[in-house]
Each structure stands twice: as structure tokens, then as C-alpha cells.
Amino acid sequence: ELKELGKLLEAQRLEQRTNFDMEMMREIGFCSGIENYSRYFAGRKPGERPWTLIDFFPDDFLTIIDKSHVTLPQIQGMYKGDRKRKENLVEYGFRLPSALDNRPLKYDEFLHIQNQTVYMSATPAYRELELSGGSIVEQVIRPTGLLDPKVEIRKTHGQIDDLIGEIRGRIKSGERVLITTLTKRMCEDLTEYLTGINLRVRYLHSDIKALERVKILRDLRLGEFDVLVGINLLREGLDLPEVSLVAVLDADKQGFLRSRSSLLQVAGRASRHI
């Protein structure tokens, strides 16, 4: 097929790679990337879904998907991301087309082999609401007596001066502040400005490595600084009891991952100090 398309170099590369892999499997029983030949070993047809651990579960198994508003889109994106990467490998003669069948489950395939599923989320998306068919149980469990955060909407005119006043008040009380902006540039510029007026500020966004993010959050809790400016990383899964104020700048403007559910998640980072 590659030769028919005039891709002689790619065809030669694929032939050499495949012959080498076959020789390795004959001699030592395996080769690097042997999983890309799994379709042949399993006797599957082209495009047929791969076997997974789920196929070995008993008939009455239960699937619990935590933070389903994030997890389901990730499951949906796994196949597409894997497919895009391997299409390039096949196109340029690095792998046989069978490599495309060594893949994650498609979203519909994953749902089809589920038996019974519990979706868990504080902000369920339309997917979970539709799949649950109205079987929704709301659990508001606050064993420590936490209250809902108080939400205030303020004018954007003079918002920075207003924000600085709120920050200074929280600092006097020994508390911390989270600020979310629309873009990385705004995040860094605001951090620079607040630092220039002698506030202890750090920023957090996707350019910062994962281990460094953990250190920054730890330093915030320890009081090494008082204000953390971010974009989309200050949402799910953060339990910061020291934080008493979450300021969402330009909350009325759309941005990447800015939605009703994300704003609710951001608001949920507050009121954990009570």
C-alpha cells in the first residue's frame, strides 16, 4: 500500500522493522512493541475492540466513577488521542496498521460493557445526568459542619483595588487567598503587580511541573506566602482549610474550561476554614 502511494522510504522502513520484529519473536519469544501485533495473537478482526480486565469481571460487577464530570471526557478522549498518534506511525512506515487495534476502548464500547455504574460528582455534566436516567441521589454530607461558601458578585470597575483590600484583610486574619484569572499571561502579570506592592504572591499554571505544584500548595498552607494566582488548576481535589477567599476575576467572561461546573468547583475551595 505504501509503495502504491509512492512512499518507498516508508515501505522499506516498515518491511525492515516488521522482519526484525518477527525474527526477534522467533528467536527469543518477544520483541520491542510486541503489543502492536496483539490483533494477530488474539485473533481479532480489524477494528474489533481489544480485550480488557473488565471482560474478566463477574456479571454483577459495579463500576464507581469518581469526579465523573472530568473522568468521562478523559475516557472519551483516550481513544482519539491514541488513534491520532498511531496514525502518524502507520503513515510513515514505523508500524503496521495492526498497531491501530492496540488501543483503549472507545467511549461507546466502554459504556456498552458496563453492568451497573455509579457516577459521583459535585457538579455532574449532561452525560451523567442523561446516562443515569433520572436516578439521582443528592448527598450533602458535612461531618465537620462546613457551610456553603458565601458568593458575592462585584463590579469589575476598580476590581484590583477592591481585591487588594480584601487580600490585606485576610492576611491580617492569618488566612490565605486564591485568585483565578482567564489566561497565563494575566496570571503572571497579576502576580508581578501584587508582588510589587509587597504582597507575598505565587502563581500556578500548566507550565509548572507537577512536583513543583505540590510544593507551591504546601508552601501556601505553611504560610510561606499568602496569595496564590492560578487559572484552571485551582479547582477539583484541593482541600486548603487555610483559604478563606477565592476571587474569580472576569467571572462573566468565557475562557478555556470556564463553565458553570468549573465555577462551582472553584467556589468549593472556599469556606473550608470555618
Image: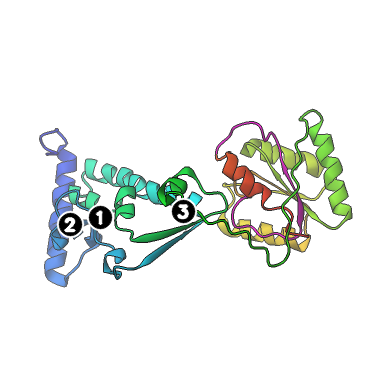
Three-letter code for the amino acid on which mark 1 is drawn = Asn
Would residue 102 be visible to someone looking at this image?
Answer: yes
Q: CA distance from mark 3 to mark 2?
A: 39 Å
Q: Regarding mark 1 in the picture, which secondary structure is present there? A: loop
Residue 100: % across, % down: 24, 49
Q: Regarding mark 2 in the picture, which secondary structure is present there? A: helix
Three-letter code for the amino acid on which mark 3 is drawn = Ser
Point 68% across, 58% down: residue: 217
Q: CA distance from mark 1 to mark 2?
A: 7 Å
Numbered badge on residue 135: 3
Tag 1 and tag 2, C-beta contact below 8 Å: yes
Looking at the image, how many numbered discs can be counted on the residues? Answer: 3
Q: Splitting the image into 4 quarters, where does residue 182 fall?
A: top right
Numbered badge on residue 102: 1
First of labels 3, 1 by sequence position: 1
Q: Give the residues drawn in magenta, as a range.
A: 234-256
Numbered badge on residue 39: 2
Point 83% across, 37% down: residue: 162
Would residue 96 be visible to someone looking at this image?
Answer: no
Q: Regarding mark 3 in the picture, which secondary structure is present there? A: loop
Q: Is residue 253 magenta?
A: yes
Image quadrant for the N terminus?
Answer: top left
> Which residue is at the far front?
134
Three-letter code for the amino acid on which mark 2 is drawn = Arg
First of labels 3, 2 by sequence position: 2
Mark 3, mark 1: which one is toward the viewer?
3
